[in-house]
Amino acid sequence: MSRFKKLLVGCLVSSIILGGMNGSAVYAASNPQVTVEWNNVRQQIDGFGITQEEECTYVMNEPYRSEVMDLLFSQEKGIGLSLLRTEIGCGESKPTIEPENNVWYTDGDPRELWYFNEALQRGVKKIYGTVWSPPKWMKTNNSWYYGGFLKKECYQEYADYLAAYVKIYKQYHNIDIYGVSIANEPEYPASWKSCLWTPNSFYDFIVNYLKPTFERENLDTKIIAGESGFWNEHFVEKLLTTPEGREALDIVTSHQYQGFIQDFPLSDQAQKKIWLTELCDTSNGLKTDINDGVDWAMKVHKFMTIPEVSAFFYWRGAHTTSTNQALIQINNNTDYTTTKRLYAIGQYSKFIRPGYQRIVATENPASDVYATAYKNPITGEFCIVLVNNNKNNNYVLDVNLQGVSSGYLTPYVTDLNYNIEPLEDIPVTNGIATVSIGSKSIITLVGTQNSTPLTTKSYDTVDTLDHMGNLYDSSPKWTIEKGNDYGRYDNDSSCLRRIELSKQHAIYKYPGINDFLATLYYCDNLNNIQFSISRDGIDYTPLQVEHTKPIHTTKDWNRVKYFPSYDIPQGTNYLKIEFDGGTNEWNKHLAEIAFSYDSSAIALMDDLSDLFQVTTSSNLVIGGQDGNQKEKFDNDTTRALRTTTDAGELIYTLGDRQINDFDVYLYFYDNTDDPFQDISFSTSNDGINWYPLETKSSGTFYTKDHWYRKTYSPLNNTKVGNYLKITLSGGKYEWNKQISKVILY
C-alpha cells in the first residue's frame, strides 16, 4: 500500500478542506448541491438484468466464456447483474416442454441450464421467463412466426403449460422461476417468434385461467404482464382498473423501443411494481465510446426517476452480432469486445443490490448533471450515482447527506479512461462530501451509515498559486494563468504554468521539509515532471515520487496529485519542481501544493503589514495598504519602502537567540541604476558593532509593469549574529525598492 493510501485521504490545513475527490477543490458556497434525503423513500429496487442469449456464450472456449459470465454477473469481477430474463422455449430455437398436447419434455436445454447455473453461482437472484410464442399447436396460425393469437380453446392448456414450466424447472433442474410473462411485445406480428394479444385477452387469460391455475398448483410465481415495444401500460389497463385484475397481476412491464419515458399512473395507483424488461440500440456497428456509455447511464437515471421502475433489463448481455445491441460483442470463440455501456449500467447494477430503496436526491444539481441515491434499509449501506452528460464541463459538487451520518464515501468512476475504477475515499465533513465529476462520466459514491471518519493528513501550509509570492526562486518563463474554462481545474481559478516550451523550474524553501502534496493538471501526458530536494539550495538530488490515479476533468484534461514515495531526508529545506517537454508550453499546470515542515524552526515571519516586529527602523514606512498596486507585488498589499532617497534601515533581533538563516523578499523597479548594489546586509552580536554579511540571491523574476522580485539569504556557511540589518539606498526614486517579507530562522 502506498504512503498516500495510508496517510492521505483528505488533506487538512487547519480547518480548510483540500481533499474532496482525490483532493478536488475546497468547499465553496457556489458549488452545486446534491441533497440526499435518507428518510424520503421512493421505490424498492429488485435489480438489474439482461435477456439471456445462452448459445453464443456456451460455445466459447475457456477461460473466455467464464470471463464473459464474470463481466455480466459477478459483483466482484464484473457489473453484478442480479436478474435474468429468459425465453420460455416454444420448440423453435429452444425446446418446448410440451411439443404436443399432453406430451411433456423435461430434459431441458443443456445450454440454458448451464447458463442458469453459472449466473446463479455468480449472484443472480431472480430468473423469470417470457413467452415469445406459445407452442404452435396452441395458436390460430399454427406457426411460431408472424403473430397469430392463442386459440381460445387453448387458454387452459396454456395456463397449465406455464404452471408446468415452473414446476418442471424446479423438480428436474432445481431452478426457481420467479415469474412468468405471458407475451413479448403482444402488439407486433413479427417475422420471428411472436403472438398477438389484446388488453381484453390479457385480462381474460390472466384473471380467469392463469391466476386460478397457479393457485390450484400452490405456485407463488409472479404473474408479469405488459412487455409492449411501446413504453406504455396499455395492455394491462383493464387489469389495473378492476379489483380482480389488480389481485391477479403482480408486476407491470414494458419495453421502450418507441414512446417517451413517462410515468405509469395506473400502475402507481394500483401500487404495482414497474419493470423495464427490454431495451437496446439495434443500429449497425458496435459503439464502445464513452458518449454511448453516458447515454445509457442517462436512460437508467430517467427510468429510475420518471416511471420509478424497480428493475432495469438491457436486451443482450453477450452476443455474436454486427449491430450495437449487446453489452459485450462476441467476436469468436476466443475473443470478445466490451463496451462503455456495460460499465455505465454497471455503475448502477454493481452497487444497487436487490432490496435497496431509492431515496430522494437532487436530480439535476447542475447543467447536464444528474443524481440518484439508494440505500439498504437493513444494513445502512448506500450509494449515490452521479452522471455528467456535459461533453465539455467538469463540475465540483457538494453532496449533502441529510438524515444519515457517514465518515467517508468511496467513489467508482467510468469515463474516457476508466471502467468502474475505485478512487481514493472522500471524507464527509459536517455531512458534506465534495466531489469533482469530469465531463462525460459516471461516478458512484458508496458509503455506509455511521462509518468511521477518515484519518486525514495535516499540512503546515498550502500555496494555492493565486500568485508567485510564495516561491523562493524560479526560472523566468512562468505565469499565473487565471480562469477556469469548462471547469477543467475543478474550482481552481489560478495555476502556475510555463509560457515557453522549455525546461522551467520553481523552488520552495521551508525548514525541514518532510512531506508535500502537489496538485497538477495536464492535457497530454505526465512526462518530464521532476521533483528534486536540497539542503542548501545549491546541490539538488532527484526525489522519487508517486501520483494518484489520473482523474479526467474535461476534454483532454486530467488531475493528479504528487507525493514523495518515501520519507524525505532530514535537513531538506528546498523543493524544486521542473516542467519540461510536451507538445505545448501550457500542457502542465501546478494548481496547488501543501507542505509539512519544521515550523518550529521559523523564529519570526514578518509580512510587514506594520513595523511592530522590527527592532529599529529609519527612513522606512509601510506602504501599499490601498491594494491598488498588488498585482505588481504578487498580491502583497503591504511593504516597507523609503520615505526619501536617503538610505533606509530595518533592524531585527531574536533577543538572546542567534539568527541562523533568513529570507528577505524584495521588489524593485527596473529604472533603478543598479538595484542589487543598493541593498546590503549587516550582522552584529550586540547591535552596536556591525559587520558586512555576504548573501546569495534567487533569480530575478518579472512580476508586472517593470517590477521584479528577488529573494536574499545568507551565503552558505555564513554565520549570522544576534542582529540583522537590512539597508536600502540609492536609486532615482524612494519607492524603487520595497521589502515585502522577512523570515528569520
Image (tube, rainbow, N blue to C red):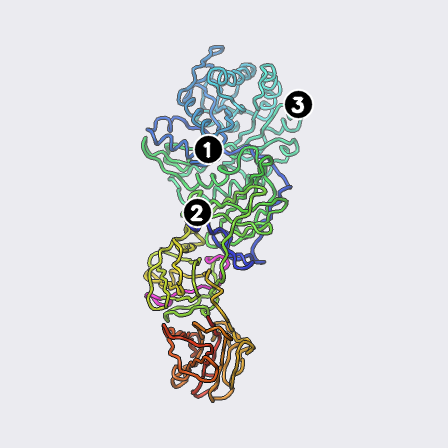
> Which residue corresponds to mark 1?
315
Name the residue at 64% across, 24% down: 245
Viewer can see residue 627: no
Viewer can see residue 563: yes
Mark 3 vs 1, N-terminal side: 3
Q: Looking at the picture, tell me which residue is in the foreground, 558 or 135.
A: 558
Mark 1 vs 2, N-terminal side: 1
Foreground disc of the pair 2, 3: 2
- Specify start and end residues of the magenta stretch as a single range: 488-504
Q: Amino acid at mark 2?
A: Asp
> Which residue corresponds to mark 2?
415
Question: Tags 2 and 3 in contact by the CB under 8 Å rule?
Answer: no
Name the residue at 49% across, 49% down: 389
**Residue farthest to the top?**
102
The quarter holding residue 554 reads bottom left
**SS at circle 1:** strand
The circle on residue 546 is none
Please check the rendered image and state whether residue 602 is part of the magenta-colored stretch, yes or no: no
> Which residue corresponds to mark 3?
244
Q: Is residue 617 above or below residue 236?
A: below
Q: Looking at the picture, tell me which residue is in the foreground, 96 or 729.
A: 729
